[in-house]
Image: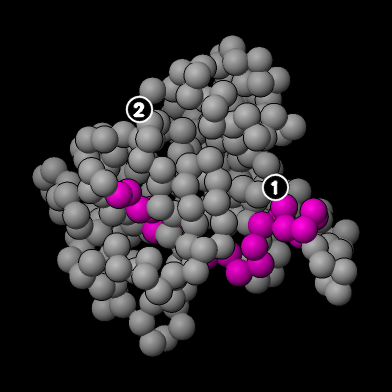
Amino acid sequence: MCSSSSRSGSPATGKLILLDSQSSSPDWISNPESLLNKASEIGEGVFGTVYKVPLGSHGRIVAIKKLITSNIIQYPEDFDREVRILGKARHPNLIALKGYYWTPQIQLLVTEYASNGSLQSKLHERISSIPPLSWANRFKILLGTAKGLAHLHQSFRPPIIHYNIKPSNILLDENFNPKISDFGLARLLTKLDKHVMSNRFQSALGYVAPELACQSLRVNEKC
């Protein structure tokens, strides 16, 4: 069963909530959890595991992130409110959040799929038979990433702070346009404290702002 974002009232537990009308499609099945049965894992990060999921017979593909439930908001109303804020972040250089599914045991985020993987894979995990990124594509990725971050910082009040920008969170579409993923997911933590943040992002210390690495947590869109 699924629900459109135009409906009013409290979010229903165990329903797929769609954040835009274009996502409403017969391809969506009644039990979103069963989507994972035909999914292939394509990545794993500090917030959860990402799966590539085919939908229907038309070749449509989405990405589904299964969130790690530890430290994630456990009340559907709070989760719904924060996810809807992230769903409003629409920009060519941001991964579009299309919907979510919430139960006390499992939380799924449904997003668009980027067919060329992550910048991390292109820079550091490339096999020898695949040529490196051209300088033109590198510049495109650099500029697009800056534009995506600028949108998060300038188009929302308060600004959406990524907290974890790094090559594995910069995804590439079929034309090597960059799309920032995982933005704002820190909003889904039950509390934004030093212990949680240091545990979540200790693997990315080479990329985080000095303010966050030092655990001051006095961060803003400039750091």
Categorize mark 2 by other alpha carbons within 10 Å: few (<14), some (14-19), many (20+). some
Helix, strand or loop at mark 2: loop
Residue lying at the far bottom of the rendered structure: 57
| Residue 161, magenta (yes or no) | no
Q: Quadrant of residue 157?
A: top left
Q: Position of residue 12 (x, y in %)?
A: 15, 50
Look at the numbered disc 1 and give the secondary structure of its residue: helix
Q: How is the image coloured?
A: one colour
> In the rendered structure, which amino acid carries the disc numbered 2?
Thr
Q: Where is residue 153 in the image (x, y as percent from the top left)?
A: 55, 33
Picture disc at residue 190: 2
Q: How far apart are marks 1 and 2 (CA)?
A: 26 Å
Instruction: Identify the residue at horizontal 49%, vertical 57% (top origin).
Output: 50
Question: Magenta part of the protein: which range?
Answer: 106-125
Lower sequence index among marks 1 and 2: 1
What residue is shown at x 17% (from left), y 66% (from top)?
A: 1
Q: Which of 19 and 205 is in front in this view?
A: 205
Q: Label 1 neighbourhood size at 10 Å, few (<14), some (14-19), many (20+)?
A: some
Task: Name the residue tied to disc 1.
Answer: 167
Judge whether 215 appears above or below 16 on screen. above
Q: Is residue 197 visible?
A: yes
- If the image is split into quadrants, where does the C terminus sit? top right
Horizontal and vertical percent position of residue 164? 60, 36
Image point 71% across, 33% down: which residue? Answer: 207
- Name the kind of residue labelled 1 in the image: Pro
Q: How many marks?
A: 2
- Along the horizontal axis of the image, is 131 left or right of 72? right
Q: Is residue 26 left or right of residue 144?
A: left
Query: Which image quadrant is residue 6 in?
Result: bottom left
Compared to residue 105, the image places residue 134 above or below, namely below
